[in-house]
Image: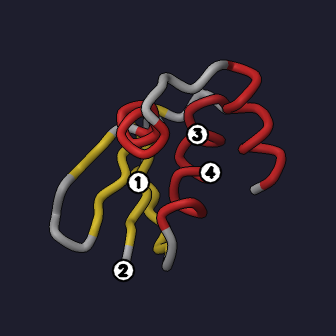
Amino acid sequence: MSFTVSAGTASRVYSWQHGSLLSALEQGLSLTTSGMSDVRIVDSEGRSHSPAALYQRVFGQQPTDAAAQTLARAA
């Protein structure tokens, strides 16, 4: 399965391709905690999620700041 992570700054929009859900989620959470705007994760079927919503869908809970920081350090 393919996942695209996108995020923006005031002047540009960036995107990255990932082959796994977890790597896309790690990067999405990392980008969110680093202050990037409009961070989205799009799956191969075109469904778009915020990193927090996707985390909740996969793990059944909201990511805590500690969990987001742990995932960001792992990325």
Residue 14, position as x, y percentages in the image: 46, 57
Amino acid type, residue under disc 1 in the picture = Ser
Disc 2 versus disc 4: distance between alpha carbons?
A: 16 Å
Question: Mark 2 or mark 1: which comes first in sequence?
Answer: 2
**Which one is closest to the eye, mark 4 or mark 1?**
4
Location of residue 38 by image quarter: top left
> Image point 25% across, 73% down: which residue?
44
Residue 4, position as x, y percentages in the image: 38, 65
Q: Name the residue under label 4.
A: 26
Which residue is at the front of the view, 30 or 1?
1
> Image point 65% across, 41% down: which residue?
30
Q: How many residues crowd around disc 2 within 10 Å: few (fewer than 14), some, or many (20 or more)?
A: few
**Which one is closest to the eye, mark 3 or mark 1?**
3
> Image point 36% across, 33% down: which residue?
53
Residue 73, position as x, y percentages in the image: 83, 45
The kind of secondary structure element at disc 1 is strand
Disc 2 versus disc 1: distance between alpha carbons?
A: 17 Å
Disc 2 versus disc 3: distance between alpha carbons?
A: 19 Å
Q: How many residues crowd around disc 4 within 10 Å: few (fewer than 14), some, or many (20 or more)?
A: many
Q: Mark 1 points at which residue?
A: 6
Q: Mark 2 points at which residue?
A: 1
Amino acid type, residue under disc 2 in the picture = Met
Q: Mark 3 points at which residue?
A: 29
Q: Is residue 59 visible?
A: yes
> Image point 59% across, 41% down: which residue?
31
Q: Quadrant of the N terminus?
A: bottom left
Amino acid type, residue under disc 4 in the picture = Glu
Instruction: Identify whether 8 is placed above or below 14.
Output: above
Cβ atoms at labels 3 and 4 below 8 Å apart = yes
Amino acid type, residue under disc 3 in the picture = Leu
